[in-house]
Image (cartoon, helix red, strand yellow):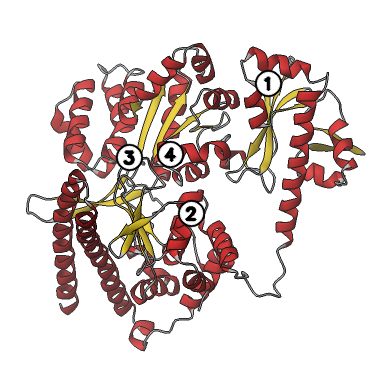
Amino acid sequence: MTVISEIKQRIDIVELVSDYVPLQKAGRNLKGLCPFHSEKHPSFFVFPEQQTWHCFGACGTGGDVFSFVMKKDGIDFSEALSLLAQRAGITLGPPTMPSKPEDGEREELFQINEAAAAYYHHLLLDTKAGEIARSYLSKRKVALETIKQARLGFAPDSWEATKKYLMGKGYKEGKLIEAGLVIAKEGGSYDRFRNRLLFPICDIQGRVIGFGARALDESLPKYINSPQTSVFDKGASLYGIDKAKDAIRRENSVIIVEGYTDVLMAHQHGWRNVVASMGTSMTEKQVAIAKKLTKNIVLALDADAAGQEATLRDAEVLISSLDKKTTPIPLWSGLVKYENVLDAEIKVIVLPKDKDPDEVICENPSAWRDLVRQATPLLDFAFRAVTNKLDTSKAKDKSLAMDRLMPLIYEIKEPVKQAHYVQKLAHLIKVDESVVVVALRKPKGRGKGAGPSLSQVSSQLLSDPVEEYCLALLVQYPELRQIAKELSGDHFESTDNRELLIRWQDSPGIPTLRDELDIGLLEHLEYLLSKAFPAPIREDEKTRRSAFIQCSLRLQERLLRKQEVRREQLLVLENEAGGVAAQLAKLEEQGIEASKELREIFIKQAQHWRNREA
């Protein structure tokens, strides 16, 4: 038994979920208000017999104990494994296995940063030297309560004050340099932050990982940050995420701004779901943090030309980094094809000229509220931003508009919506609509952004032999990677199998994958690598390919059947508990689509066997 299986066996999902959600009986199962979105009528169900949960409301997702903790606490699989192992009383790894030296080093850096944050905070609030920073914050209308909650600080105008304080606490000079608080020089070292307002930057768990610092005089640059360390990566951090995570889940939306003060003022005025990219363009790592909490992302950036261009760059990162879901697209024949559709909504807040979010919020909170409500869908913003800079009477600019906007239109899989934007683009660049349609069908017209390679996320149920057979083929035979593109996390019900598939998809090979995995998944990988296959599969590539294709189609079929079973389950449960008619009608419609999808899978299976026999 692997450690993951042992955890699942020891932890009862009803007991776990009840720590977060009040549950009541619904036949043989339990239900309650979903902890991941606001609702008045319970749509969140726990199934004790299967040890699973599922939200039949806005979330539309479910899973096991691992996926529940990951989604509720906004953590990754490795962190959930550690948390649940502790809850189950299981020690990860062999008892004699020593902890990695880097783990202890990272923990010391967290401690140093925490001590520095407390020191800077004291200097800001309780010393005469901190008056300059207090005066600045007063002018920016930052309330005392906000200062305390954010633990803002002040670095004195001294070359060694911070170093001496922390060394007096027992920390070595070399560690202060490693933490980025002190800069090494020939024959000694000196404080990095001097005469600056300090913004502690925390990870999602609330640990101080670094600092942002604003000059309080004419020093340049105006803002500096901690350097890259083993605990701080600016491109992998979102300022305010530790304070905003609960609001992001509750509102099912995150607003991303640029600056520290933008976040502080938003939180101070009640918009707690706001975080900052700290002046950088969005990165895939930042998107990875946000998408664990919500699929609805709003960008609030500068309104000038540079800001619009930055927003478009951020949008490209979002589209390539956010998850996609496999969605059935009906064909005229009555069959169904599968498309990967962006499983998120991206909007843009268009700020008034020369105004930052904190200025809008302070001067007129209701104006900010209106800007949030009127946030523009990304594609509409992109159309305006691109075409405003072009002369669409010129052939060259028409072509530029096509090249920039076609990849975005290609991402739209809903036929009516896609047709709307095809017509809009044709009208804007003054060409016949058929020209855009033809370009959309050609690979060249789709641009580099078409069909990006995305990580897939699902939250389903328990492991089984079909999943393990499929994964074992993939990890043992690298040549199958090329025909595994239709598989996503959605097809794997067990969190450990799903996580391993995702890591495998993102890894160039098994040696690298081994280095990246935590003890739980590494144990599972070694188990799959050790699985023995019969001689025909070991010795013949054609047989292996056929076996994998059949296995892949079986997983797709099972997923669709599971959707139909869940629909029927919900009908029974809601009849027992007096459900909501609108939700049932929606599920009825989804059930019809699932039947069509199954028909398509059966046709694929039949074609595969015909091709094999031929």
The correct choice, above or below, for 127 with respect to 481 in the image is above
Q: Nearer the viewer, residue 356 or 205?
A: 205
Depth-wise, is mark 1 or mark 2 nearer the camera? 2
Q: Which residue is mark 1?
A: 222
Residue at 84%, 33% in the rendered image: 162
Callout 3: few (<14), some (14-19), or many (20+) C-alpha neighbours within 10 Å? some
Q: Which residue is mark 2?
A: 70
Instruction: Name the amino acid, label 2.
Output: Met
On the picture, is 552 further left or further right than 6? left
Residue 337 lies, in percent from the top left, at 18, 54
Q: Residue at x 11, y 50 (%)?
A: 331
Q: What amino acid type is highlighted by mark number 4? A: Arg
Whichever of labels 3 and 2 marks the residue nearer the N terminus, that label is 2
Disc 3, SS? loop
The amino acid marked with disc number 1 is Lys
* Residue 106 horizontal/vertical position (percent): 71, 52
Of all residues shown, which one is farthest toward the bottom?
535
Is residue 228 or residue 289 the one in the foreground? 289
- Marks 4,1: beta carbons within 8 A: no
- Give the spatial CA distance, label 3 vs label 4: 37 Å
Q: Give the residue at mark 3.
A: 447
Q: Is residue 74 above or below residue 83?
A: above
User: What is the number of the mark on residue 250?
Assistant: 4
Q: Residue furthest right?
A: 187
| Gap between marks 3 and 1 measured at Cα | 39 Å
Residue mark closest to the camera, 3 vs 1: 1
**Cα distance in 3D space between marks 2 and 4:** 16 Å
| 3 or 4: mark nearer the eye | 4
Say which quadrant the C terminus sits in.
bottom left
